[in-house]
Amino acid sequence: MWDDPRALNRLTRLILAATLLFALWTAGRTALDAWFPFRQITITGATHAETLQAAHALVPKLRGGFFSMDLASVHDDFGRLPWVRNADVRRLWPGRLVVHLENHRAAASWNDRALLNVYGEVFAGTPWRSLPRFYAPEGMQKEVARRYAEFAGIVAPLDLRVEQLVVSARQSWRIRLSGGVSVELGRDKLHERLRRFTDFYPRAVAAVGPIPRVDMRYPNGFAGEVHSGPGTSRQARQAGEA
């Protein structure tokens, strides 16, 4: 080809045409950005101070105008901000960019290293004291969140709350309720066993006093540890219909 003048001329014309097209495209994009910039950027939905601060710091870094801005990239940038579960980014003619941020709603602490939202999704954050504590193998987030909602509804009539939920590596479940009551549920029939706890526990407490530890893995009742005095305890069993 290098010995063929015609081929070289064709190649030269192609390079010049590509260079001209690129220059025209660049000039056109620059003109569009100048003629149709975003004159207003509105951010809604952010309720956490950390999110607002990060969002406002991101705005000056956005590049492009109404027609040239890469909205997919902007969506990803806002979606990575602290406490943001999802970002919706839209253009509004003639020069407005609207970003709506959906916040994570924390339901619990997850393994003391992150937070779990109400959808069973783990996200970065520092747990605080009043949050329920969940300890479970990774990958069980959605099931644990679902079970938590179920358990909370079952014990609510007793004016109790689920403060801690533990799932062992062997899939055995244990919960700690407000007031310090620990309830062992085991690996199966979790709903049935906790229902039985709410039926039997008030009567057992009325009969023998506070029972801080309860084992519901019995078919027709439960076993519990009763404090009978300072530094002493004894085992109590309560039978009944399953």
Image (tube, rainbow, N blue to C red):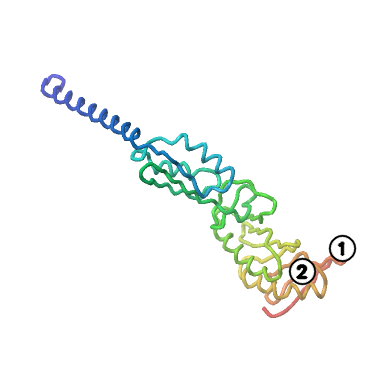
Q: Is residue 96 left or right of residue 117?
A: left
Residue 71 rendering spot, x and y as whole percentages: 39, 43
Q: Earlier in the sequence, mark 1 or mark 2?
A: 2
Q: Nearer the viewer, residue 155 or 213?
A: 155
Residue depicted at 74% across the width and 64% down the height: 181
Q: Is residue 80 left or right of residue 148?
A: left
Residue depicted at 46% across the width and 41% down the height: 77
Q: Nearer the viewer, residue 59 or 227?
A: 59
Q: Quadrant of the C terminus?
A: bottom right
Q: Return the residue found at the far right.
A: 230
**Residue 123 numbered mark, or none:** none
Rendered position, 123 above or below 7: below
| Secondary structure beneath label 2 | strand
Q: Nearer the viewer, residue 131 or 5?
A: 131
**Residue 232 numbered mark, or none:** 1
Residue 163 rendering spot, x and y as whole percentages: 69, 59
Rendering quarter of residue 38: top left
Q: Residue type at mark 2: give it.
A: Gly
Residue depicted at 69% across the width and 77% down the height: 220
Query: Which residue does the numbered mark 2 point to in the structure image?
Result: 224
Circle 1: is it few (<14), some (14-19), or many (20+) Cα within 10 Å?
Answer: few
Q: Quadrant of the N terminus?
A: top left
Q: Is residue 210 left or right of residue 164?
A: right
- Disc 1 to disc 2, C-alpha distance: 14 Å
Q: Residue type at mark 1: give it.
A: Thr
| Secondary structure beneath label 1 | strand
Rendering quarter of residue 203: bottom right
Residue 213 rendering spot, x and y as whole percentages: 76, 65
Residue 160 rendering spot, x and y as whole percentages: 70, 66
Residue 140 seen anywhere in this rendered image of the structure: no
